[in-house]
Amino acid sequence: MKRAHSRTLELIFARPVSANVRWSDIEALFLELGAKITEREGSRIAVVLFGQVQVYHRPHPRPTTDKGAVASIRKWLESNGVKP
């Protein structure tokens, strides 16, 4: 895993939940883990990873992800054995 992806993973698992995680970095991490990302209506995307589909809303106009989404992503990754 590239250093940038490792850094993103560390930010996702940071306590307290970080508010400075760029959404583009999270998408790049998903792709690195082997995900397929498809566009949905509006700003939504479907992430197919671990044989599961999760739907997320791309943040806008700011590039950073809200804390609730980061916590949700952390829980999903953790439940599938991904840790920093």
Image (cartoon, helix red, strand yellow):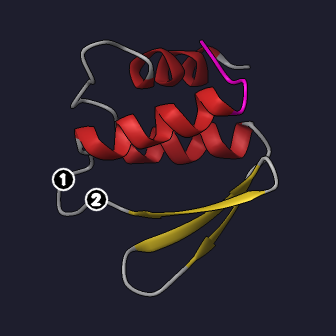
Whether the magenta-drawn stretch holds residue 15 is answered as: no
Is 80 left, or right, of 55 in this rendering?
right
Q: Which mark is residue 59?
A: 2
Please, which residue is most extreme toward the front here?
79
Is 14 left, or right, of 25 in this rendering?
left
How would you rate the neighbour count of disc 2 (Cα within 10 Å): few for under 14, some for 14-19, many for 20 or more?
some
- Residue 53 seen: yes
Q: Secondary structure at mark 2?
A: loop
Amino acid type, label 1: Arg
Question: What's the magenta bit mostly, secondary-structure-wise?
Answer: loop
Q: Spatial distance from mark 1 to mark 2, Cα to Cα?
A: 6 Å
- Residue 40 is situated, as x and y percent measured from the top left of the image, at 52, 82
- Residue 3 is situated, as x and y percent measured from the top left of the image, at 61, 14
Q: Which residues are magenta?
A: 80-84
Q: Quadrant of the N terminus?
A: top right
* Mark 1–mark 2 CB contact (< 8 Å): yes
Q: Which residue is at 45% across, 87% downward?
A: 41
Q: Secondary structure at mark 1?
A: loop
- Residue 69 is situated, as x and y percent measured from the top left of the image, at 35, 46
Q: Which residue is at 64% across, 32% downward?
A: 79
Q: Quadrant of the C terminus?
A: top right
- Residue 65 seen: no
In depth, the one of 31 and 69 nearer the eye is: 69
Amino acid type, label 2: Pro
The residue that label 1 is drawn on is 62
Q: How many marks?
A: 2
